[in-house]
Image: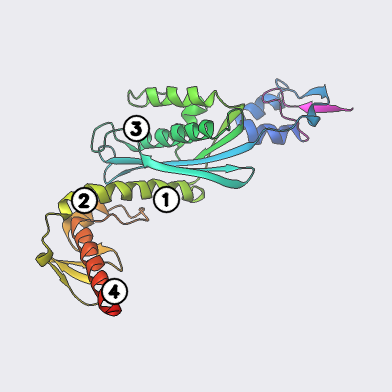
Amino acid sequence: MGKVRICPLCREPVDAFYTHVLNAHGTEVLERALKGEIRPVEVEGEASKPSPARVTVYYDGACEPRNPGGVATYGFVVYVDGKKVGEGRGLAMAEPWSNKSSNNVAEYSAMINAFKWLIENGYRGADVLVKGDSQLSIRQMQGMYEVRAPRIVPLYQEAKRLAAAFRRVRFQWVPREENGEADMLSELALRDYWREYKAEKAKEIKPEEVEPLSGLKFRVRHYIVDLEKYTCDCPDYRRANSNPRLRVKLPCKHILAAESAARQLEACWDVKGRT
């Protein structure tokens, strides 16, 4: 059995040592390796050991319609050996509309919930690569940035505690364009909340205040709702959807009232069609 070169930092078998150090540990560690401060170790038979599952987590958070002080939500996606195995979304670990609700809280909530998902689903001890487009949370978890904000400190500590359950955890910043799935999940979580948030207000609108127009258009009170485009010309809708980066549209009470009327009309036509 021949000797195998092992990275002394993560105990991974390596062929191209410097390339591995750069990809796995970053430029600062690579500089130390180039200076000779870190060298590969030769061992017997290490390559014959089975490799742990390679897990990649994408995470993201959002806080709308204002940051801070809006509604913070999160999303994450899990891949194992290149295959998608799970995802999650929900409200961040902060009361909506409170001063503790922020984008950074949402980002850490995504990371924490992703770690919990991995542990609950049997990936304790895995090799985990965490990818996100939040430079702050990534750099803080890498130890490059200090953690000072009082509302972030306990979330950072919880993330570090959960990360200790895995064989190795690496953190990598990616541009927003490469984090589309997690980003969309955080927006869908926001829409989930928004529908419930506006549902009670929609009950205030009486059936006679909803007038069907052509196609999927309705006049709700004195506003025009287009369910096909999912738009309303009321100020509340414009405020909620003022961020051009949002890919989902958040409903106002007029849209929800129009949706209810559309369902009733559809049911009515269905009954007529069967009689």
Coloring applied to the structure: rainbow
Which residue is the site of mark 1?
Answer: 184
Q: Is 69 rendered above or below residue 40?
A: below
> Is residue 5 a member of the stretch shown in magenta?
yes
Identified by mark 4, the residue type is: Asp
Upstream in sequence: badge 2 or badge 1: 1
Which residue is the site of mark 2?
Answer: 198
* Number of numbered discs: 4
Q: Nearer the viewer, residue 135 or 128?
A: 128
Measuring from the top left, give residue 197's x and y in whole percent. 23, 47
Which portion, as a residue range, is magenta? 1-15
Upstream in sequence: badge 4 or badge 3: 3
> What distance separates the C-alpha of mark 1 from that of mark 4?
34 Å
> What distance separates the C-alpha of mark 4 from that of mark 2?
28 Å
Mark closer to the observer (2, 1): 2
Which residue is the site of mark 3?
Answer: 93
Identified by mark 1, the residue type is: Met
Assign the magenta stretch its main secondary structure: loop
* SS of the residue under disc 1: helix
Which residue is the site of mark 4?
Answer: 270
Which corner quadrant holds the C terminus? bottom left
Identified by mark 2, the residue type is: Lys
Q: Residue at x 28, y 31 (%)?
A: 100
Upstream in sequence: badge 1 or badge 3: 3
* SS of the residue under disc 2: helix
Upstream in sequence: badge 4 or badge 2: 2
Q: Residue at x 44, y 42 (%)?
A: 88
Q: Residue at x 44, y 34 (%)?
A: 113
Measuring from the top left, give residue 108's x and y in whole percent. 41, 33
